[in-house]
Image: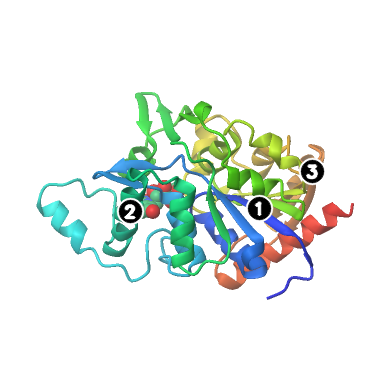
Amino acid sequence: MSNPGLTSGNVVALAGGVGGAKLAHGLAAHLGDRLSVIVNTGDDFEHLGLSICPDIDTVLYTLAGIANRAQGWGIEGESWSFLDQLGRLGGPDWFRLGDRDVALHVLRSLRLRAGEKLTAVNSGFARRLGIAATVLPMCDEPVRTVVATPDGELPFQDYFVRLRCEVPVTGFRFDGVERAGPSREVLAALRDPDLSAIVICPSNPFVSIDPILSVPGMRAELGRAPVVAVSPIIAGQAVKGPAAKMMRELDMPAIALAVARRYAGFATGFVIDHADAAQAQEIEALGMKVLATDALMRDEADRARLAGECLAFAEMLHHG
Ligand code: FO1
């Protein structure tokens, strides 16, 4: 599928979680191997002796067309014999690992233990899964999102999955990020002379996009092409996940404008839903152009449509 909006050039997308993976999928439909996706690794954790990278796996499975359609993460048509038996034996079964999914975690853990870098391990899986786009961890060093709550700190997956985001958040920190740096492959993608757009996908700004932006040196790399950010908030709601709840708990209005304020330093364009068109003027006052469209991705056609609109928007920003 060719997109009239972007006739040439390469694109880098920043993504985490299910919403980010969906737009990355739409971008991949237009761009194929001209797309690189820089993925959040702050959700990663060690579980059952396995190194698990949920956001990378969600992007891999989504771009491979095998992601579970209803929940966005995990594999469609998965079986659960492993987890069933694990529970019977008294193991922790709160983090649902399907049989096919476990194969990837086992292989990744083996290859990391053998000393391979996370980027190399994942590019191997992307190739095996037939993905044309380049899927890049934001860095090769371990970074762990820690959620601050009134009763103390929680590892991210304990907050997100075990406690189902039910505790109020007071802040986040990205353990290890100060010792991290954009990988060679991330720098190459962001310094590509043919780079024509950077897309900040509609992921959670706090726990999916911020970890990527917090990697030392990353933000400074975002100035070489128009940066189009897509609001993860539509009409005061997150399409999926706790972003709106987090905003309220952090005393912010859960509106697209509040997300735009976080991206004002580096985004040149901001994509909102028609429902939020009344906020366009205030967002433009932040120094960004605004595109109001149907920002909801209900199906694969929506993903490609929204992606095409983002690319055309970036093209317009490129030529002023
Ligand atoms: N999310 C859940 O809400 N419940 C789960 O049991 C769960 C298991 C899981 C297994 C593998 C994987 O790659 C992702 C998984 N996720 C699960 C999603 C995960 O929590 C991600 O961190 C979220 O998508 C947020 O980015």
The residue identified by callout 1 is 12
How far apart in space, not on screen, are marks 2 and 3 (Cα)?
40 Å
Q: Position of residue 118 (x, y in %)?
A: 45, 46
Disc 1 packing (10 Å; few <14; some 14–19; many ≥20): many
Q: In the rendered image, which residue does mark 3 sit on?
A: 288
Q: Nearer the viewer, mark 1 or mark 3?
A: 1
Q: Is residue 164 visible?
A: no
Q: Is mark 2 within 8 Å of ligand 1?
A: yes
Q: Earlier in the sequence, mark 1 or mark 3?
A: 1
Q: Is residue 169 left or right of residue 2?
A: left
2 vs 3, front mark: 2
Amino acid bearing label 2: His
Circle 1 SS class: strand
Residue type of the residue flagged with mark 3 = Met
Point 43% across, 36% down: residue: 142
Mark 1 and 3 residues: CB-CB less than 8 Å, in contact? Answer: no
Total numbered circles: 3
Nearer to us in this view, 166 or 74: 74
Are there few (<14), some (14-19), or many (20+) residues within 10 Å of tag 3? Answer: many
Identify which residue is drawn at 34% across, 46% down: 114
Q: Which residue is mark 2?
A: 105
x and y percentages locating residue 158 in the rendered image: 33, 39
x 51%, y 65%: residue: 63
Return the disc, 1 or 2, that comes first in the chain's sequence.
1
Q: CA distance from mark 1 to mark 3?
A: 19 Å
Q: Secondary structure at mark 3?
A: loop
Residue 190 horizontal/vertical position (percent): 68, 46
Q: Amino acid at mark 1?
A: Val
Quadrant location, the N terminus: bottom right
Is 232 situated above or below 145? Answer: below
* Residue 247, quarter of the rendered image: top right
- Label 2, secondary structure: give it: helix
